[in-house]
Amino acid sequence: MRTRCRMEGLRSWRLSDEGGNMKILIVDDDKEMRDVLKILLLDRGYEVVEAINGRDGLEKAAAHNPDLIVSDALMPDMDGFHFLRNIKEGDLRHIPFVFYTAIYSGSKDKELALSLGAAAVLNKTGPPEKILAEIDTILQRETDGMPKMEEEIVGEEEFLKSYGVVVEEKLEEKVKALEREIEERKRIEERLYESEERFRAIAETAIDAIISLKAPDIIYLWNKKAEEIFGYKADEIIGKNLHDIIVPEKYREKAKEGIERFFQTGQGTIVGKTTELSALRKDGTEFPVEISISEMRIKNEWHATGIVRDITRRKEAEEALKMRLDEERRLNNILLQREFRIKELKDENAKLKERIEELEKNECR
């Protein structure tokens, strides 16, 4: 959160030659950290000059003659310790220098920085209010003209020795941190490998084909059941375009439009549903399948996994049942027609019988 309190006693402070507020040079190779500190300082009423490393800092300090230098320690080209040493050995030694670091914050690091003439060592991870208060105090002390002890410049040999110790300690810390990171990565990789093995075991023993795709239409998972259903071995189909191989040509163009839209949006007309479609085997025969497609978002990219079931036998059974039902309906119709004919014949016979009886009565008369 940006701090919005103003410095106390601002009226009594020394102004720069241009008549503006006190000027602070920020030296840091990390732009985000420079921006954060810059916002805090500008809000505090300071002018800010920026530099990206110690060498750039020397040039900016000579050009702008700041009231305070706030510098990171670990930087490329020229780090903060060499930058501080160059400042204190030159014409700019009067400028108070503050280390602003998250890495070089140990006791020996501070001891070296202070021995080189740093006014303070501030931790980047500390509360902004505390950092600003320390900067205010240092500048107020400079403005009030409080007496300072004569700074004794550390000799080259002593500096290199102390600097070597500090750098060696940091390297050891880095090595240990890297070792911990490597161990953690190994544990993560082992867990990932176990998870992949479990998934692979499930996929390989599944009773349905399991197929996974990534953009633009590339197969990267093809289980044993998929081999059995479609006739392609995994090593001859993984890495190829699915729709060019198993989608019948008459449906291919529309299917490709759908898969292209899916990889852009993660949506599709058959995503999240169970649908009956036609597919092609390796030998070119077309057969019916039932497919369920689910979407996954991996590393900001859409992936699709389809569970495919060969429903040829089911369709054959359905067709056989339909044919039997049709035959039963045909026979029922024949039987009904027969019953109607028998009834018609009975009615005609009854009428003839009545007619004969009527004729016989007339003859008797």
Image: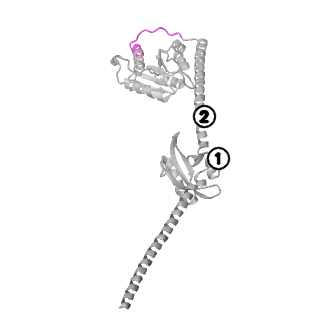
Q: Which one is nearer the viewer's eye here, 318 or 272?
A: 318
Q: Which residue is mark 2?
A: 193
Q: Which one is nearer the viewer's eye here, 203 or 189?
A: 203
Residue at the image point whose x is 54% and y is 57% from the top: 253
User: Considering the image in quadrants, where does the N terminus appear?
Assistant: top left
Residue 284 location in percent, x, y? 63, 58
Decide whether residue 144 is among the magenta residues.
yes
The answer to which quarter of the image holds residue 320 is bottom right
Of the numbered discs 2 and 1, the one sitting upstream in the chain is: 2
Is residue 20 in sight in this rendering? no
**Inter-mark Cα distance, 2 to 1:** 20 Å
Q: How many marks?
A: 2
Residue 338 location in percent, x, y? 47, 73
Instruction: Give the residue type at disc 2.
Output: Tyr
User: Considering the image in quadrants, where does the C terminus appear?
Assistant: bottom left
Task: Give the main secondary structure of the magenta stretch.
Answer: loop
Local SS, label 2:
helix
Residue 236 location in percent, x, y? 66, 49
Disc 2 residue crowd, few under 14, some 14–19, many 20+, Cα 10 Å? few
Q: Which one is nearer the viewer's eye here, 189 or 194?
A: 194
Q: Which residue is mark 1?
A: 234
- Circle on res. 353: none
- 304 lies above or below 74: below
Horizontal side, residue 343 vs residue 307: left or right: left
Local SS, label 1:
helix
Is residue 327 in sight in this rendering? yes
- 238 lies above or below 278: above
Residue at the image point whose x is 51% and y is 68% from the top: 331
Magenta residues?
138-152
Decide whether residue 166 is among the magenta residues.
no
Instruction: Give the residue type at disc 1.
Output: Ala
